[in-house]
Image: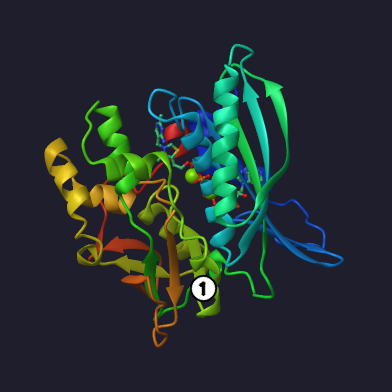
Amino acid sequence: MRDETVGEAGEFTVIDRATQGRVQPATTLVGPGDDAAVVAAPDGRVVATTDMLVEGKHFRLEWSTPEQIGRKAIAQNGADIAAMGARPTAYLVALGCPPSTPLTVTDGLTEGLWAEAAVVGAAIVGGDLVESDQLVISVMALGDLEGRSPVLLSGARVGDVVAVCGRLGRSAGGLALLAADRDGAPELLAAHRVPMPPYSQGPVAAGAGATAMTDVSDGLLADLGHIASASGVSIDVSSAALTGDAVLNSAAVDLGVDELAWLLTGGEDHALAATFPGDAVVPEGWVAIGTVGEGGGVTVDGKEWQGSVGWRSFGK
Ligand SMILES: Nc1ncnc2c1ncn2[C@@H]1O[C@H](COP(=O)(O)OP(=O)(O)O)[C@@H](O)[C@H]1O
Ligand SMILES: Cc1ncc(C[n+]2csc(CCOP(=O)(O)OP(=O)(O)O)c2C)c(N)n1
Ligand SMILES: [Mg+2]
Ligand SMILES: [Mg+2]
Ligand SMILES: [Mg+2]
């Protein structure tokens, strides 16, 4: 019998096998499983995360400029730092590319990487460069909790309010337009090419008492599902609280697709989603979209969502 493959097992089974039962030293304050790890250093704590972009899977050079791809690689990683309640402080960038890659591509990437790092006052502090068959950009981000406690996936409590900061569905809408070779809706194309995580709102939410937080990378339902399972709670999302983006709506009507599916299951917006105690005031700029209850799983308007809840590497 041949060995089971990664494609058959799926992303999260393979991650479980890579992390379960491994002993972490006492300096690992938060280990694998959250948006980022928190590691104790003799003189403080550092938040660390990594996310990789692969040509053809995460971006296409026909759809995005090298500068936009560089910005996206940094934004995706910075969002995971912000989702811990931390401020991104430094990035390392490992690049793989074919020898035939024009220097205009690597220079464009560099411009984008630095421009997005600069949004939070950070820089690229190191990296690696190797030959590979397609363009691969692997970023590691470090962050500073500035004295705050990290906001974990596991802290949501029954009675909490679920709130979101940042637009949802726009990246999925932009991707659908690019895939259909349709233009129009420049806002959606821009959102897909360069997500704009509300970095500073991670620390703001932590300061406002957020009990759990994540960034929306795979899709709202998929990512809230991680909060629900880590916290041992259920989450119900109100669809009425999500709709109202006229640009998104008209693109969905034009393409003849379900706008709600983009809002609930579209990935790569890198908005922040958090839970706050029911009696807390949700910070300015955050929109209440749901509630936390007993049990498990994520529902929409009290009903189970039919279909995929979001992006899965390897399609599972
Ligand atoms: N190969 C691996 N070894 C150890 N931990 C991993 C590995 N791949 C992913 N993880 C961890 O599993 C969790 C889920 O990964 P992922 O879904 O990529 O997170 P995110 O959506 O926050 O980027 C994260 O905590 C990540 O650090
Ligand atoms: C060419 C192309 N096809 C498909 C997509 C859609 N897509 C790729 S990755 C992804 C979700 C997030 O990526 P992942 O690597 O899972 O990030 P993480 O959850 O680890 O932060 C989505 C929606 C895309 N951006 N580009
Ligand atoms: Mg990841
Ligand atoms: Mg991520
Ligand atoms: Mg993912």
How many numbered discs sit on the rendered protein?
1
Is residue 126 or residue 34 the one in the foreground? 126
Question: Horizontal placement of 149 versus 46: left or right?
Answer: left
Outermost residue to the bottom: 279
In which quadrant of this rendering is ligand 2 seen? top left
Q: Residue furthest right?
A: 42
Q: Can residue 134 be seen here?
A: yes
Question: At which x and y percent is residue 182?
Answer: 22, 29
**Does residue 291 lie above or below 46 as drawn?**
below
Which quadrant would residue 56 be assigned to in this image? top left
List the residue tagged with mark 1: 204
Q: Quadrant of the C terminus?
A: top left
Within-10-Å neighbours for mark 1: few <14, some 14–19, many 20+: some
**In terms of depth relative to the viewer, which is nearer, 72 or 9?**
72
Amino acid on which the number 1 mark rests in the picture: Val
Image location of residue 276, percent across then percent down: 44, 77
> Residue at coordinates 50% horizontally, 34% vertically from top-left?
67
Q: Nearer the viewer, residue 17 or 292?
A: 292
Q: Determine whether the residue tagged by mark 1 lies in a helix, strand or loop.
A: helix
